[in-house]
Image: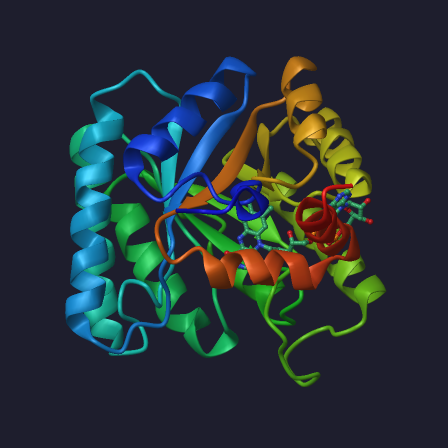
Amino acid sequence: MIPPIAGRFVAGETPAVAFDHVRAANDDGVKVILNLLGEHYDDAADAAADVDAYVDLLRDIGATTLDARVSVKPSQLGIDIGDDVFRENFRRVVEAGDEHGVFVWCDMEDADTTDATLDAFETLAREFDGGVGQCVQANLRRTRADLDRLADVPGKIRLVKGAYDEPEEIAYTDKADVNEAYREDLEFLFKMRDGGIAVGSHDPKLISFARELHAEYGADFEVQMLMGVREDEQRRLAADGEEVWQYAPYGDKWASYFYRRVRERKENALFAVRAVVGV
Ligand code: FAD
């Protein structure tokens, strides 16, 4: 069972409990992107098991009226085993999404996997007429060129700052440089696309900037934030008319995800300590 302290960031261990979370969030006007926890598989059977779980999840979401989507990780779909394994598994998930009318997102992981991930996304987004979305990372120096390449690809693009430590040669490592790259990439997206732009950030300055860009260029956008981070703001933005999607992981592999959230921000660590000592 997930301890309450980790339950702030993880929607539950089973799809049924995760669906309860989706229902409650939807009641507050917040839509939910579900991610089955699991990554860096080196055994094809583990990747196949998660693909099966996603296929069932997509069928179950499709049978409801819930505002829910899914997001998969390349290394969960076997990219560390082989690009072909990943491509085939990603295709199976997108096919199931297409069959059940549920949109499928793909996360972006470390820079060694960027090319294979974008290639698979582009193929599937064209084949399934935009029923799939891809995350890109503003901290990578290559991202501006990648966005150029993706300019006429259907589907959605989620822009994030980037959660992986990458070397200086390929990535901006200074926070201010990442923020600047994010703004430039976001403006480029608004200039190039009619819509399908997701601002994957908790940063109030970037969300305001997206609103300004929307006013200037007209393209629609959505805001995406993580479960457990600035949830009051998620509800406030939704009440204010923004389309807000909350990324909510679920599953029994919750421990490493929870510790990552606690490590990355002192407020989260403080929350964890308070939960343990009861203050
Ligand atoms: P930060 O620089 O962390 O924070 C900026 C500002 O936001 C802060 O100054 C503060 O004002 C506010 N803020 C942030 N956190 C809090 C908090 N806990 N409480 C109060 N205020 C806060 N990364 C990847 O590499 N690949 C992915 O596929 C990926 N998918 C993601 C999907 C979603 C929906 C989201 C939200 C993030 C994803 N990320 C992904 C993570 C991302 O790259 C960043 O590491 C993470 O979002 C932190 O950056 P930030 O933009 O939120 O801003």
- Number of marks: 0
Q: Residue at x 66, y 58 (%)?
A: 262
User: Residue extending furthest front?
Assistant: 277
Q: Residue at x 51, y 75 (%)?
A: 111
Query: Can residue 245 be seen?
Result: yes
- Is 47 left or right of 19, judged from the image as shown? left
Q: Residue at x 58, y 61 (%)?
A: 259
Q: Whole-percent x and y of residue 69?
A: 37, 35
Indicate the colouring scheme: rainbow
Q: Whole-percent x and y of residue 80?
A: 32, 77
Q: Is residue 216 above or below residue 40?
A: above
Q: Nearer the viewer, residue 258 or 133?
A: 258
Query: Can residue 148 be seen?
Result: no
Q: Residue at x 72, y 28 (%)?
A: 233
| Residue 264 in which image quadrant | bottom right
Q: Is residue 208 above or below residue 35?
A: above
Q: Nearer the viewer, residue 17 or 73?
A: 17
Q: Whole-percent x and y of residue 85?
A: 19, 70
Q: Is residue 86 above or below residue 275?
A: below
| Residue 137 in which image quadrant | bottom right
Q: Nearer the viewer, residue 201 or 275?
A: 275
- Is 106 left or right of 161, judged from the image as shown? left
| Residue 122 in which image quadrant | bottom left
Image quarter of the C terminus: top right
- Is 171 left or right of 33, judged from the image as shown? right
